Amino acid sequence: MPAEFVHLHVHSEYSLVDGVTRIKPLVKRVAELDMPAVALTDQSNMFALVRFYKAAIAAGVKPICGVDVWMHNPDDANKPDRLILLVQNNRG
């Protein structure tokens, strides 16, 4: 039975400050755990998405594409807000 849990906030090696996860081992482990999907949300970039998408499809895992961005906080410019954006379909 597939796992009900899906990671929706994963940083890869392309999140230079805090990501250490490599794409192929991530997708391999998700498939081993029978998870139906996983999201890749690197910090302020989408450089890994093509590699992630191809690896996930090949492993039978639904890729959820996203990004982790910092937004201007009008109340305190020194404390930006964080926003995780996930792709729903080809339109948004």
Image (cartoon, rainbow, N blue to C red):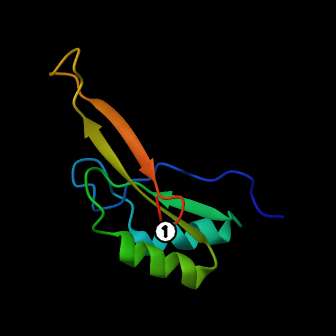
SS at circle 1: loop
Return the residue nearer the eye: 84 or 24.
Answer: 84
- In the orientation shown, which residue stands out farthest toward the right? 1
Image x and y of residue 69, in percent: 30, 44
Q: Residue at x 39, y 60 (%)?
A: 21
Q: Residue furthest top?
A: 75
Q: Closer to the camera, 76 or 39?
A: 76
Q: Is 26 located above or below residue 15 in the figure?
A: below
- Left or right position of 6 against 64: right
Kind of residue at disc 1: Asn
**Local crowd at mark 1 within 10 Å, few (<14), some, or many (≥20)?**
few
x, y percent for residue 14: 27, 62
Task: Identify residue for label 1.
Answer: 90
> In the figure, residue 62 lies in which quadrant?
bottom right
- Would residue 50 be found to the left or right of residue 39 on screen? left
Horizontally, residue 36 falls left or right of residue 46, namely right
Query: Residue at image x 46%, y 75%?
Result: 53
Residue at (24, 24) in percent of width and height: 73
In the depicted structure, whether residue 70 falls above or below residue 88: above
Q: Position of residue 34 (x, y in %)?
A: 71, 67
Q: Quadrant of residue 76?
A: top left
